[in-house]
Image (spheres, rainbow, N blue to C red):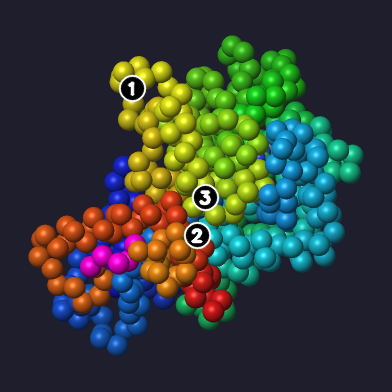
Amino acid sequence: FYGALISPTSLTTYLALPHALISVSPAGEIEWLEHDVPASQLQDVLARHGLLSDIEIVELRKGEFLIPGFIDTHTHAPQVPNMGSGQEHELLDWLAEVTFPMEARFADVGFARRAYPSVVRRYIDSGTTTCCYYGTLHLESTKALAEIVHANGQRAFVGKCNMDRNSPDYYIEPSPQASVQATLELIAHIRSLPRIRSSDHGKPSSAEALVRPVLTPRFAISCSPELLASLGALAESDRSLAIQTHISENESEVVFTKSLFPPEVLPAALSPVHGPVTYAGVYEAYGLLRENTILAHAVHLEPTEVDIIKRTRAGVSHCPTSNFNLRSGCAKIGILLDEGIKVGLGTDVSGGFSPSILTAVQHASICSKVVALQSPSDSAVAGAGKFASRQLPVATLLHLATLGGAQVCNLADRIGSLAPGKAFDALVVSVRSDAGNPALWGVDLDQDFGLGQVEGEGGRHKSEKELEAMLERFLFCGDDRNIRRVYVQGRLIGGKEFMA
Ligand code: GUN
Ligand code: FE
C-alpha cells in the first residue's frame, strides 16, 4: 500500500505519514513500513526490500488514508434489532422492558440465523475489525453468531451470556451447571472453527484463530455465587480464556449488586476482601479479573475499585453513547488513563444507538468535556495527572478506538496499530467529496499530499498538518460512507467498495 497513513504510537502521539509505503505478506502480516517515500523513489525502495516491480501495489488517492481498524470492546449482537427504541429507561428497567424480550427471541435459532448476518455486516462496514460480542444466553444461537462472524472474516470474541438469577422466567438459565455446560460447548465449538487465511486458498492452516470464545457472566446481578465460582474455576483452568462483563454502570445496579454479595457470601479462600465489598471486589473474589478481562462502563467506580482494576491489569471498555443514552453517567476515563489502566471504546448497542466506533469517539470527547466542565477549576486539578478532568485530545481518541482497544483485548502485540510484526487489520478511509458525506465536504480541497508529490521539508510539514486535520474531521464528522475498505489479516472483508 502506498499513500497516506495514520497510526497511534502512544496515548498522546500518532504517526501521520503523507507518503508511506507498507508491505503486507500474503498471510496478512505487516512486513515493513517506510515512513516517507517520494513517488520518484518508489521502485528503488521496493528493490531495496527485494521486491520485484510487478508486485501488486494498492495506491491510495488524494484524500484517502490508511488507519488501523477500529476495535469495539463491548457490544451486544442480539440487541441490534432494538437500536433506537426504548431509550426513556435507565438500565434495570430498560433490561426488563426492552432488552430481555428481544434477546429471548433468539431462543429460535432460525431467527438468529436471519438476524445475525446483517448485524455482523453492519459492524464490519462501520470499520470494526475486532469486535467483542455478547450473544444471548442461548447456546445454538450464539454458535450461529460465531459461525457468521467467522464466515465474514472479522476478528472477534464471542460469548454467550451466563445468567441464572434475577432474570425473567422466560429468559433465564435453569441452573449454574447448565450455564457452565453450555459455555463449555460454545468454547469447544468456536475453537473447532477452521482457521483460514487469505494465503491458504480456503485450506485450513495453523494460523491464529480470528474468532475466539470469551466467558460472559452478564453482570454480577444475573449470576448466582455458585455460577460465578464455577466460571472463576473455568477461567483458572484456562488462562488464555478472555472474560467480559459489566461493571458499575448505573447507581441502582451498584446498590443492588452490593446487596446480593455481602461479605459472608464471598469466597474468602479465593481472595479475602478487606473492608466493604465493592462491585470490582466481587469479581475479584471469584477470580474473574485479570489481564484478559474486559470491564464495560466503569462509570461509578470507587477509588478502591480503581486500585483493584489496576492491580489485576483488567481493561475497561468506555461506552459513552450508552452511558449518556441510559442516563448512567459520565465515566471518568482520565483518572483511569492516569493510573495506566487499559481503556478502549465500546458501542454497547443497544444501550448505545450506533454500531459505529466513530460515534463512540465523538461521545468520548463530549464525555471528557462534561467531566472537565464539572470539575471545580483548572487549578483544582493542576496537581492531577495528564488526563483527569481534561478533554481528551485527538491522539487519545484515536488511541482509544484502536491501540487502547487492542490492549483491552490483550492483543496489542497483534493489532491496534500499523506496525511491522502485527496483522494488517486496517481501513482505507476516504474524506474525498466523492465519498458522498456532505459533512466532510471541502476537506480535500486544499490538501496537497497524495501520489506524485515531491516536497521539501516545508511541504512535508504542511502535508502532515493537513493529514492531522483530516483525521480530526473524519473522527468527528465521518461515517461508514467514508470507510471505503476494511481489511482483517490482509483480507478485504468490507467497506463501501467491498459491496460495490
Ligand atoms: N448490564 C447487564 N446487561 C446489560 C446490557 O445488555 N446492556 C448494558 N448496557 N448493561 C447491561
Ligand atoms: Fe453492555
Relative depth, front residue between 266 and 78: 78
Label 3 belongs to which residue?
359
Ligand 1 contact, mark 3 (Cβ < 8 Å): no
* Residue 260: quarter of image: top right
Q: Of label 2 and label 3, which has the lower sequence position?
A: 3
Marks 2/3 in contact by CB < 8 Å: the verdict is no
Relative depth, front residue between 340 and 177: 340
Q: For the residue carrying disc 3, how many other residues have a C-alpha within 10 Å: few (<14), some (14-19), or many (20+)?
A: many
Q: Is residue 170 something that shows in the picture?
A: yes
**SS label for mark 3:** helix
On residue 378, the disc is 1
Quadrant of the image for the C terminus? bottom right
Please give the name of the residue rendered at 35% of the width and 17% of the height, measured from the top-left corner: 380
Judged from this view, the residue extending furthest toward the right is 169
Q: Of label 3 and label 1, which has the lower sequence position?
A: 3
Q: In the image, is 222 to the left or to the right of 401? A: right
Q: Does 445 appear in magenta?
A: yes
Q: Which residues are magenta?
A: 443-448
On residue 190, the disc is none
Q: From mark 3 to mark 1, how far is it between C-alphas?
A: 28 Å
* Residue 168: quarter of image: top right
Q: Position of residue 336 (x, y in %)?
A: 44, 31
Q: Position of residue 125 (x, y in %)?
A: 55, 65
Relative depth, front residue between 13 and 190: 13
Label 2 belongs to which residue?
479
Q: Of label 1 and label 2, which has the lower sequence position?
A: 1
Judged from this view, the residue extending furthest toward the top is 275
Ligand 2 contact, mark 2 (Cβ < 8 Å): no
Q: Is residue 153 above or below residue 256?
A: below
Quadrant of the image for the N terminus? bottom left
Quarter for ligand 1? top right
